[in-house]
C-alpha cells in the first residue's frame, strides 16, 4: 500500500485527534469553544499534519507518536488563518468554503479563538507525560520558533507592511520563507525530535526539502488564487489582487511562476536522495503540493 | 534583608531578563519587534514575576532557575493586555501610562505583537536545554493551562459577553477566577515544577494562597479603577463604569468590596501557615497586592 492510499486515513486520523483534543463546544465558555471547533474542524487540506506523518514514515516514527505534533501544527495553522482573516488584517470573509470565524462569531471572539488555539498547540505538545520529556520539549521549541516573530507571525507582519508596495520576487520569497515556509518546515522537522540519534545531515536534508516545498506551496497558492475554482479552494477568488498583494504570478508572470514552482519541486526531490525508496511518502506529498487544485 | 528590600532588585532583574529574551527592536521585522518591546518593557508592576520569585524563595528555588518562568509569565500577561485593549475588545487607549500598543503601532501590528509574545513565552520555557527537560515541560503545561480557553483567554471571552448584562457577585468571581486568577496561580505554581519531591499538600496550599490573592488582586484593581489616581495606575480612570462592566464595588458596594478583599487576604495568609517563617516573601506580596495604590 502506497502513501497515497493512506492519505485519506491520515486526514481522518488528524480530524478525530483534533476533535478529541479541543474542548467540547458545550464546555464553558461555550461560544469560545464553538468558535475554536468551527475554525479547526471539518475542513482544510491538513497539509501540515500530512507532511508530519509522511516525514514520520520516512524516519520510522509511528503515527501514534505524532498525533500530538500533527494536532499542534494544525492548531497553529488555524490560529493564523483566523487572525489573518480579521478586518484589521486581510479582511477575508470566506475560508474553507464557509464564513471566516470573525464573520460567524464576531471579531472579539475570533481574536480570542485564535489566541486559545495557539495556546492549545503548546498545551497538546506538553501533555501526556508518558513519552519522553526532552522529545516533547524539543517539539515545543521547534514549533515556537516556527510560529513566532522570526517565523510565521513575523512573515505576516512583513506581508501587511508590503501591501500596495512594490516588491521584488526576492523580497516576496524572503517574506514567504517566514510566513508559510517556517511552519511547513516545522511539520517535516517535528518527527526528527522523536529520533534522538538522527544524523545532522539527515535532518538538514529534510529541512532543505521542506524549505523548497514551503515556497512551492505558496507559489501554487498564488496560482490557484488566479486560476483556481472558488468552489474547490474555499477562499475568495482573486483576493490577492484585490488587496494589491504582490504574488508570484504578478511579479514573474504566470508561466515563470509555474516554472519556479517546478524548479523548487525538483530541488526538493533531490534533497531526499539520501533516503532512497524510504522517502516515498514525502515524494508523494511534494507532488500533491504542486499539482493540487485546491 | 527582608523580601521588601529585594523587590526593586527583582523588578530590575525581570526587566533585564525580558529585554535580553525579546528580539532586538532593529531585528527584522522591526515594527513587530519594536511593538513587542514597547508593550513589554519599561513599565508594569511585574506582580506575576514577583510572585514567581517570592514563591521560589519559599520553596528554596534560586532566582536564576526562575528567570525564564518569570519572563514567560510576563510575556503572556502583556500579550493579554495588548489584545484586551484592542478596539474590538475593551477599546482602551491608555496602558501603563502610555498609548496602548494598537494606538502606537496600529491594530494589525498590535494583534501580531500579542500573538508573538504568547509564542515567545513558550519558546523561552522550552529554551536552554541545560536544565531538566521534565521541569521545563511541566512549566509549559502549567502556563498553557492557565493561559488558554479554560483559563485567562476563556475568562476574557466571558467578560466580553457579560458587558452590559447583569451579573451576580458570584458570576463575577467565577469570571475573574479564570481571567485574572489562573495566571496569578501559575505565577505561584511554576516554581513547584522545579521541586520534584514537593508534597502535594504544599503545592495545594500555595495554590489556595494564589487563588485567594488572584481574586483579591482583581477586587483591588476594581477599587483602584474608582478611587485610584490615573497618574499612578497608568490606566484610563473609570474605564470599567464607562464600559458598563460589572465590578466588585458596583455589585457589592465599595465598603463590602474592600471587606471581601480583606477576607481573601486573611484566607490567603492562613493557607501559608504550614510554611512558617519561610513564607515571608509571599506574605509580603499578599500585603502589597491589597495595599498598593497603582
Image (cartoon, coloured by chain):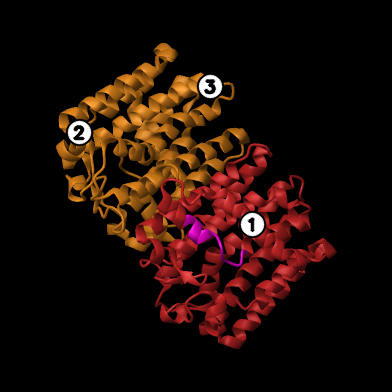
Chain colours: A orange, B red
* SS at badge 3: helix
Instruction: Please state the chain letter of the residue tagged with numbered disc 2 in the rendered image.
Output: A
Task: Say which element carries label 1.
Answer: helix
Specify the label residue A200 is tagged with.
3
Q: Quadrant of residue A180?
A: top left
Would residue B191 be found to the left or right of residue B101 on screen? right
Who comes first in sequence, dot 3 or dot 2?
3
What number is the disc on residue A252? 2
Q: Where is residue B68 in the image (x, y as percent from the top left)?
A: 63, 49
A283 lies above or below A41:
above
From the viewer's perspective, tell me whether residue B8 is left or right of residue B179: right
Question: Image check: A203 left or right of B269?
Answer: left
Q: Does the magenta stretch include residue A246?
A: no
Does the CB distance between marks 1 and 3 fall below 8 Å? Answer: no
Chain at numbered mark 1: B
User: Residue drawn at (55%, 21%), measured in percent from left and top?
Assistant: A198
Q: Mark 1 points at which residue?
A: B14
Quadrant, the N terminus of chain A: top left
User: Callout 2 environment at 10 Å: few (<14), some (14 to 19), or many (20+)?
Assistant: some
Range of magenta residues? B36-46
Q: Nearer the viewer, mark 1 or mark 3?
A: 1
In this rendering, does residue A131 appear at all? no
Dot 3, how many residues are within 10 Å of its Cα: few (below 14), some (14-19), or many (20+)? few
Residue density around tag 1, few if under 14, some if 14–19, many if 20 or more, within 10 Å: many
Cα gap from disc 1 to disc 3, whole angstroms? 36 Å
Residue displayed at 67% across by 74% down:
B264
Amino acid at each position: 500500500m502506497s502513501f497515497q492510499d493512506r492519505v485519506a486515513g491520515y486526514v481522518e486520523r488528524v480530524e478525530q485527534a483534533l476533535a478529541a483534543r479541543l474542548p467540547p463546544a458545550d464546555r464553558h465558555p461555550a461560544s469560545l469553544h464553538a468558535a475554536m471547533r468551527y475554525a479547526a474542524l471539518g475542513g482544510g487540506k491538513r497539509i501540515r499534519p500530512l507532511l508530519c506523518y509522511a516525514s514520520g514514515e520516512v524516519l520510522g516514527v509511528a503515527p501514534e507518536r505524532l498525533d500530538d505534533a500533527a494536532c499542534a501544527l494544525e492548531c497553529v495553522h488555524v490560529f493564523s488563518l483566523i487572525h489573518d482573516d480579521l478586518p484589521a488584517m486581510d479582511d477575508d470573509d470566506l475560508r474553507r468554503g464557509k464564513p471566516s470565524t470573525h464573520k460567524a462569531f464576531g471579531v472579539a471572539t475570533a481574536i480570542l479563538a485564535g489566541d486559545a488555539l495557539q495556546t492549545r498547540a503548546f498545551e497538546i505538545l506538553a501533555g501526556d507525560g508518558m513519552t519522553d520529556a526532552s522529545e516533547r520539549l524539543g517539539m515545543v521549541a521547534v514549533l515556537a520558533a516556527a510560529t513566532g516573530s522570526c517565523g510565521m507571525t513575523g512573515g505576516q507582519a512583513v506581508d501587511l507592511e508590503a501591501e500596495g508596495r512594490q516588491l521584488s520576487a526576492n523580497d516576496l520569497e524572503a517574506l514567504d520563507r517566514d510566513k508559510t515556509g517556517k511552519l511547513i518546515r516545522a511539520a517535516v522537522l517535528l518527527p526528527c525530535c522523536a529520533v534522538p540519534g538522527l544524523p545532522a545531515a539527515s535532518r538538514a536534508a529534510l529541512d532543505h526539502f521542506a524549505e523548497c516545498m514551503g515556497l512551492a506551496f505558496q507559489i501554487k497558492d498564488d496560482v490557484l488564487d488566479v486560476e483556481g475554482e472558488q468552489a474547490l479552494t474555499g477562499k475568495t477568488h482573486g483576493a490577492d489582487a484585490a488587496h494589491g498583494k504582490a504574488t508570484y504570478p504578478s511579479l514573474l508572470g504566470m508561466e515563470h511562476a509555474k516554472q519556479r514552482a517546478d524548479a523548487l519541486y525538483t530541488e526538493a526531490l533531490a534533497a531526499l536522495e539520501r533516503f532512497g525508496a524510504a522517502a516515498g511518502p514525502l515524494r508523494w506529498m511534494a507532488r500533491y503540493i504542486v499539482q493540487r487544485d485546491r
